[in-house]
Amino acid sequence: MSFRTRLFLGILIAVLLPLGALAYGVRREMERRLTAEYEGRVGSMAEVIAADLARESGTVAARLRALSADLGRNNRFRLAALQGDPSSRRFLLDYAGDAMGVSGLSMLQIQDSAGRILSSGHFRNEFDQLQPELPRLLSTDRDSMTLVRTRTPENPLVALARVDSFQIGGRQFSVVGGIEAESRLLDRLTRGRDLEVSLAYPGVHQPTAAGARAVVREIQLPYLDLLRGSGVAPDTARFLVTQSLGTLEALQRSVDRWFLLALALTVAAALALAGWLSSRISRPLRELAQKTSAIDLDRLDQSFDSERNDEIGALSRLLGAMTERLRNSSARLREVERRAAVGDLARQVNHDIKNGLAPIRNVLRHFSQIARQDPALLPTVFEERKGTLDSSVEYLETLARNYARLSPTIERTPCDVNTLVEEVLRNTVAEGTALHTSLSRRLPRALGDTLMLRRILENLVGNAVDSLGGRSGGAVTVTTEPAGGDGEPSGVRIVVADTGSGMTRKELDHAFDDFYTTKPDGTGLGLSIVRRLILDLNGTLRVETEPGAGTRFVIELPADPAGRASA
Amino acid sequence: VPIPTNDSEQLLFSNLFATLVRIDCRGQVRPGLAVTWRAEPARSAWIFTLGGSAGSVDQSEVAERVVSSWKGRWAAVAALGVESTSIQGDSRLSVVMSAPLDSLPLLFADPTLAMSHQTDSASWRIDGGTLRRADSLPGLVDFRVTRGVDPRDAFDAGADLMVTRDPELLDYAARRPELVTSPLPWSRSYVLLQPAAAGPLDKVIGDAERRSLARDAVSADARAAQPPFWWDEVTGCRTGAAAGPTPVSSRVVYLRGDVVARGLAERLVALAGPGTELKAAALESADFTAVLRTGSEHAYVVALPRHTLAPCRESAALPNGARIQPLIDTRAYAVVRRGAPSITVEWQGTVRVAPR
């Protein structure tokens, strides 16, 4: 998982947790408070509705009492009901319908003592049908209201019913009346748009608003279903006072929408922040890693300067201090190496001088001996041994020249490497060997010493030519190219490649040792000098070789800072 | 010429349109457009001599109008058994029947074969519910539609004749000495009609129930339906009504506005008992006609003419194979102001204003 992804997830979690907790808390608190308020409201409304029901029931009872009183005095009803007077029969049949319209009732039925329907208002033509259970069950508690489900010709009728009775000629008659409950009564009871009053009775499901939560209170009433096929048994119906929680749900949906919006914004912000932070943090780290990976004992010129005041700046400065310590350590190490080399050199010089002086001493001893024994022979012997002296002297002079090369004086100036390469190759004697160049036109000037650079090139080109051993077809190629830097080169790369015999691993390990040579007449100081010169110029040297395939010496020297722009 | 479907149309159409012959309330054939008639020897052709009330006009023109009018609705005319018709001379009309008849077919008094008295239809005009006719009858007769108006107001405003089945109106007329109330022939039979596949609702109806229906369930002058019933004698009719599917409803349907049918339907529902799902339902005329043809309802309370000269035409609207249970007969009353022009009553209870 990338640093940016981890950063994104971290920011997201850090923001989402409190955000989610806030949304949950708001929803829960809203639900608790609103539900409590609704419950109180519905409870109060249920009490009001219960009082309304009682009042309606009382109204029905009062109207039935008035009708009973009227029927008791009515002569035509008396004639029809008691005497069976045919001329009054239609009056009897129509009486309940007419009375129902006048009294404002929705249901009215007059029965005799046997339960025979004498007149029905809500179902005019159900006369002579027997329904004794209705007044009987309603009479069990005359003061209570009962919900009755009966029928009209077209539809079932649910009414809030009461019963009354009267006597004519010693015969008992019942009057059952009521008001329609499912629409008319409910319309009267319903208050407010969100507050719904519905009716539920056995066999009829009265759901609340589809899919919506609600606060519900019940008002229970006795219930009689006259349409039930097998007998009539008291049951219970319920008026449901329902407060829809639609407002609460709308608020919660609103909170949800805002939460989702905040979530979307958070994700977007987290993405942007993670991107910005990762670029601000990881890019400097990558750069530090690149610089650190380039650090080598031969390449301690990396700069870790930073103006940042944060941890990255501190780390950069620590790496810079470490590099500085490495640089100092490297210098000390190089000094130790130099001193060790000087000691070796002194012993070698001592040895070489002794070797060079030994013939001279022997000739001089010979001359002393001749002078003592036969001075006249001195000219002759001198002539004979003069060659030995000259040879020894020449040897010593050669040694002196070679040793003189071991301690050059460095003078760093901008150097035109391409020109140096061309001059060196021009002066190189290479019989049977092809010399090639591949010189970059955009090569910046190298910061170094022209003489030292010439000696480096002469040694490497000479070694390359020597490695070919005069074989025909061999080639030496010198290549120059800019090195380092993304846009502007920071150094100069010189590659001297040959197609010679190459080096074994062992030979490579000792290639830069002083006085190590594989050539019969070699001094073993060439590559040693080359390496020291390059290091003195703050450059690097890398060797790529393979036995039988040739060798590539890759030199990288710092470019002249002032000359980069003109390169 | 439209076929009347209620008392108002019957009163109006019988006075606006004339047939070759008329049938009086005793069933006797009386002259109409034709004054005499005779049969050809084979009795498949009948020769009518025109005259009568149309005598003041050119009889050849009347004959041409009869032929032209019949050809304009030939399918209905042919359904009555008329094969062809032609004019013989100036005033004779020859009608060839598809089958020989022993006596003058009464169907020549059927409204299907009626035609307008008038030669100029432009003389008819309707003004705001009043259809005024200026015809060959002496004087002027106004026909007023009183729907939506208390019919008692019409009498108070001076109406001379009213045909009604409303007991309240008859009670009002009986209390007015200047009005005479006369019962008309039993003209309408209410039947319970059930598709063949419907449950046996008609089984609960016996003579006692029919009497009770006539006495208590309806608000009209009614009696238990008495035979003969023309639908029992219908044979060989080409019925247009398809055999209905198994009824899916539990309704007893009736035509909205027909209070007698409503009372009967409701009483039938009451008799069926509370344990059933049966209920009464009123349907508008178009809907009622449609469900009557399909036979998709459990039962229908239908008003049929007590008498008809064209039983096949009447039965064509009924579902094929339906059971018909007669319930009650009803009749209308003619309420006439004393001193008003005389009226005649025809076989099916139609009232015609007699010429002065």
Image (cartoon, rainbow, N blue to C red):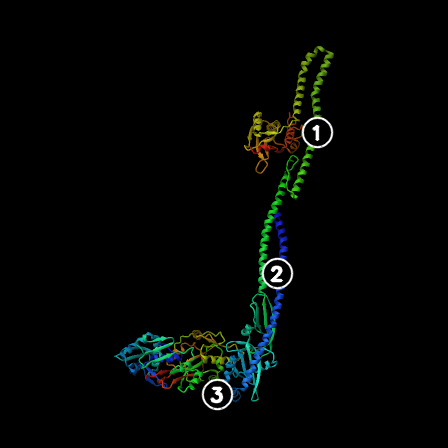
Q: Which residue is mark 3?
A: A87
Helix, strand or loop for disc 1: helix
The disc at residue B135 is none
Q: Amino acid at mark 2?
A: Arg
Mark 1 and mark 2: Cα distance apart in space:
83 Å
Identify the image quadrant of the N terminus of chain B.
bottom left
Do tags 1 and 3 sit on the same chain?
yes
Q: Which residue is mark 2?
A: A27
Identify the image quadrant of the C terminus of chain B.
bottom left
Tag 1 and tag 3, C-beta contact below 8 Å = no
Q: Chain of mark 2?
A: A
Helix, strand or loop for disc 3: helix
Farthest residue toward the left?
Answer: B89
Left or right relative to A142: residue B307: left
Farthest residue toward the front?
Answer: B157
| Quarter occupied by residue B260 | bottom left
Of the numbered discs 1 and 2, the one sitting upstream in the chain is: 2
Q: Amino acid at mark 3?
A: Ser
Q: Position of residue B34 (x, y in %)?
A: 30, 82
Q: Which residue is mark 1?
A: A339
Tag 1 and tag 2, C-beta contact below 8 Å = no
